[in-house]
Image (cartoon, rainbow, N blue to C red):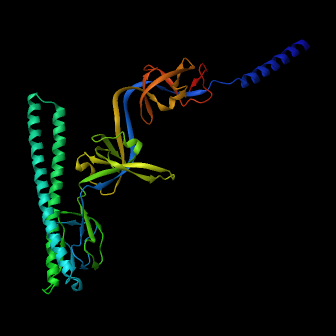
Amino acid sequence: MRWLRRLVTLLVVALVIVAIGYGFVPSPPRVAVAAVARGPLQVTVREEGRTRVKDRYVISAPVPGFGQRVTLEVGDTVAQGQRVLEIQPLRSTLLDPRTRAEAMAQVSVAEARLKSTEQQAAAAASQASLAETELSRLRGLYADGTGTRADVDRAEAEARSTLAMRHSAEFAVDVARHELEGARAALQFSEAGAGAPSEAVQVRSPLAARVLRVLHESEGVVQAGAPIVEIGDPSALEVEVEVLSADAVRIEAGMRVILDRWGGAPLAGEVRVVEPIGFTKVSALGVEEQRVLVIVEIRAPREAWSELGDGYRVEATFVLWEGLDVLQIPNSALFRSDDGWSVYVYEQGVARARGVTLGRRSGLRAEVVAGLDEGERVVTHPDDQIADGVAIRLRE
């Protein structure tokens, strides 16, 4: 009996020692893995932008005088020729011969500007007509099977562009014509100050638009050239985006843009121009950055973004490159090894280090050119517990 008790005691002590030793044995680290798979991949640049009206016009006072109160408010619609402001004469300043001579010179300048804008409008109309004719011809060739869809798409884009240039030129003609009327009114006003009965000058809108800003609301003395009201067409919007200069060199005209996070569905856009002049801007962290302004045309139908207005915030994603069938892995699986990139491949419960050759990279994914095969699994977010040949367990 005494021998049996000793044996049982020794067995219990041995089991306790084994259990304690097993508790100190390190367990394989648990890891998350991702499959090497094929799929679409986009290389993008994402920045915040804001909308702005393409054609903005500031209606200013043609002559000095006493301006009446402006009754228009922001958002009001104004018709072409509608009175915006009435300016009463200041007789003490209207009898100056120099003022009369300057007014006559302004009439000549306005007449020349009107002729120039009319010629530009005629040229724009000719270009639009030519683009429409070319589009019709290419559509006929495409219908006959002798043309390509790419030619038709380019012709449609050219037709839209020339039509927009034509409308802009017509707006410029209207503005120049009303500037001429204002200059003639200023001359008449000056001559009236010389002794003839003076009349009030009616400042009118050069085109049909909506009020964007009221710059002079209360009545009072206004100087010649003082801004009164800013008008524009809110349905003709574009987006201005400030991007880092290092990203701007990779963006070019015609590049596809996705506009989202404005309060509605994502909109299709296209880069119109990358401005050639940069500027310095201090970020929220106090870092000086060189930025460049990129102008984006909204290509989606007007009905899709009718709620957008001037100065609204949007997020612009510039698609630098995209592929539909790209072998890729998460960026979180990569780590530096010597002069290249490596990953840990999960092989039957063991991590195996393997060098990879990468292609294009987006913010979250990377293209694999060589080193991995489709279907293999790589460890994401590897830490210092993982090395080549270390046993690992998958997280549930």
Decide if residue 98 is in sight here: yes
- Report which quarter residue 391 is drawn in: top right
Q: In this view, does 299 lie above or below 230?
A: above
**23 sits left or right of 136 in the view:** right
Asked whether residue 67 appears in the rendered view, the answer is no
Q: In which quarter of the image is the N terminus?
A: top right
For the C terminus, the image quarter is top right
Rendered image quadrant of residue 10: top right
Relative height, residue 377 to residue 89 (above, below): above
Of 97 and 164, the residue lying toward us? 97
Position of 82 compared to 215: left or right?
left
Q: What is the residue that sits farthest to the right in this orientation?
A: 2
Residue at the image position 50 percent from the left and 32 percent from the top: 332
Left or right: residue 235 versus residue 26 is: left
Q: Which of 192 and 358 is in front in this view?
A: 192
- Position of residue 31 measured from the top left corner of the image (x, y, whole percent): 56, 28
Q: Which residue is drawn at 68% across and 24% down?
A: 26
x then y, percent, for residue 93 = 23, 83
**Residue located at (8% from left, 41% from top):** 133
The residue lying toward the viewer, choosing from 240 and 290, is 290
Report whether 380 appears left or right of 145: right
Image x and y of residue 236, in percent: 23, 54
| Residue 262 percent location from the top left of the image | 35, 50
